[in-house]
């Protein structure tokens, strides 16, 4: 028995068709630029957060603060980007830390009209199978990814 693309689509209601992406390596400097551009945060705050996370990652709690700040300033597009990055970071692209998300995914939320143009179901299934492969090693003690699919 295995999880199929149809299962992911039916369980999570994510689109199967659309543009697929390949995750490129994102260094901390590019991540900071993306955070400043997309979330309109101060460059110093973004730099401090990526340094604290040791790379192109941000804590989910930091994203919640960005979201609340954007809502209080009535910057709805920024709030939506922060919310969506938080959502994918704690669901379909969850990592083993369970507290952070890679900034790479923020690039998909720059233009919110294009968000549904991506094949999120294929990306979720690919991520889950990569995580299953990683956790098959004897010294691995934890599974990353969206375990609800299992």
Image (cartoon, grey):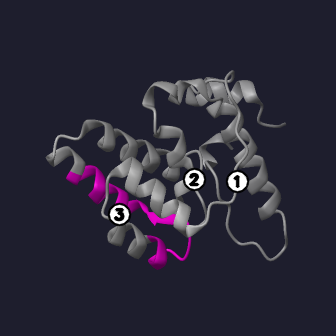
Per the model, the C-alpha gap separating discs 3 and 2 is 16 Å
Query: What residue is shown at x 59% (from left), y 50% (from top)?
Result: 93
> Which residue has dot 1 on it?
24
Residue 29 to residue 91: above or below? below
Dot 2 alpha-carbon crowd within 10 angstroms: few under 14, some 14 to 19, many 20 or more: some
Q: Which comes before the other along the chain, label 1 or label 2? A: 1
Question: Is residue 86 rendered magenta in the image?
Answer: no
Whether residue 117 sits left or right of residue 42 in the image: it is right
Q: Residue 49 placed where, x, y %?
A: 41, 71
Q: Secondary structure at mark 2?
A: helix
Chain part drawn in magenta: 50-69
Residue 29 to residue 75: above or below? below
Query: What residue is shown at x 52% (from left), y 61% (from top)?
Result: 31
> Which residue has dot 2 on it?
104
Q: Secondary structure at mark 3?
A: helix
Query: What residue is shown at x 29% (from left), y 56% (from top)?
Result: 66
In terms of image quadrants, where is residue 137? Answer: bottom right
Whether residue 121 sits left or right of residue 31 in the image: it is right
Q: Main secondary structure of the magenta part?
A: helix
Q: Residue 150 placed where, x, y %?
A: 69, 44
Q: Which comes before the other along the chain, label 3 or label 2? A: 3
> Which residue has dot 3 on it?
62
Dot 1 alpha-carbon crowd within 10 angstroms: few under 14, some 14 to 19, many 20 or more: few
The nearer-to-camera label among 3 and 2 is 2
């Amino acid at each position: 028995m295995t999880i199929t693309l149809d299962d992911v689509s039916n369980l999570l209601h994510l689109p199967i068709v659309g543009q697929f992406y390949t995750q490129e390596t994102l260094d901390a400097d590019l991540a900071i630029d993306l955070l400043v551009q997309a979330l309109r945060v101060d460059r110093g705050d973004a730099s401090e957060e990526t340094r604290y996370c040791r790379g192109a990652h941000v804590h989910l709690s930091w994203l919640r603060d960005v979201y609340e700040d954007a809502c209080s300033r009535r910057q709805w597009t920024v709030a939506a980007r922060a919310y969506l990055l938080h959502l994918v970071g704690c669901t379909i692209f969850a990592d083993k830390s369970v507290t952070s998300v890679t900034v790479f995914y923020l690039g998909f939320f720059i233009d919110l009209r294009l968000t549904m143009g991506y094949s999120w179901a294929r990306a979720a299934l690919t991520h889950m199978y990569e995580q299953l492969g990683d956790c098959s090693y004897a010294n691995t003690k934890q599974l990353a990814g969206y375990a609800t699919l299992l």
